[in-house]
Amino acid sequence: MKLTEENKAHIDSLDYEGLLCQWRFAPAGDSIFQGESGKYYKTILAQKRKEVGDAEHVRASKSIG
């Protein structure tokens, strides 16, 4: 999927926990994770993961289940 301004704005609006939740629970084949959009999502998720650190990652992971 192409990275539209709408998809980019949605991805950018999510905090780490929101990104992680969507990553875990989206249906298989969700278009947000395909093509350019998927590459951008993965990049932003990785950036925010670095920013929040290990303790927050564990907290967010446990929080969403």
Image (spheres, rainbow, N blue to C red):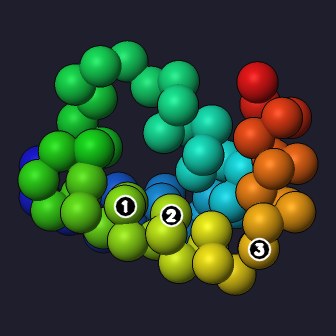
Instruction: Name the outermost residue toward the top.
Output: 27
Residue 48: percent from the left, percent from the top? 61, 73
Q: Give amino acid for label 3.
A: Gly
Q: Read off the residue under disc 2.
A: 45
Q: Quick check: 1 left or right of 28? A: left
Q: Is residue 22 above or below residue 54?
A: above
Give the Cα distance between marks 1 and 2: 5 Å
Q: Give amino acid for label 2.
A: Leu
Residue 45: percent from the left, percent from the top? 50, 63
Q: Give amino acid for label 1.
A: Lys
Which label is found at residue 42?
1
Residue at image position (76%, 73%) is: 52
Q: Earlier in the sequence, mark 1 or mark 3?
A: 1
Residue at image position (78%, 66%) is: 54
The image quarter in which residue 22 lies: top right
Mark 1 vs 2: CB contact within 8 A: yes
Quarter in which the C terminus is drawn = top right
Determine crowd level at label 1: few under 14, some 14-19, many 20+ residues with C-alpha closer than 10 A. some
Q: Is residue 23 above or below residue 15?
A: above
Q: Secondary structure at mark 1?
A: helix
Give the Cα distance between marks 2 and 3: 12 Å
Which label is found at residue 50?
none
Q: Nearer the viewer, residue 13 or 59?
A: 59
Q: Secondary structure at mark 3?
A: helix
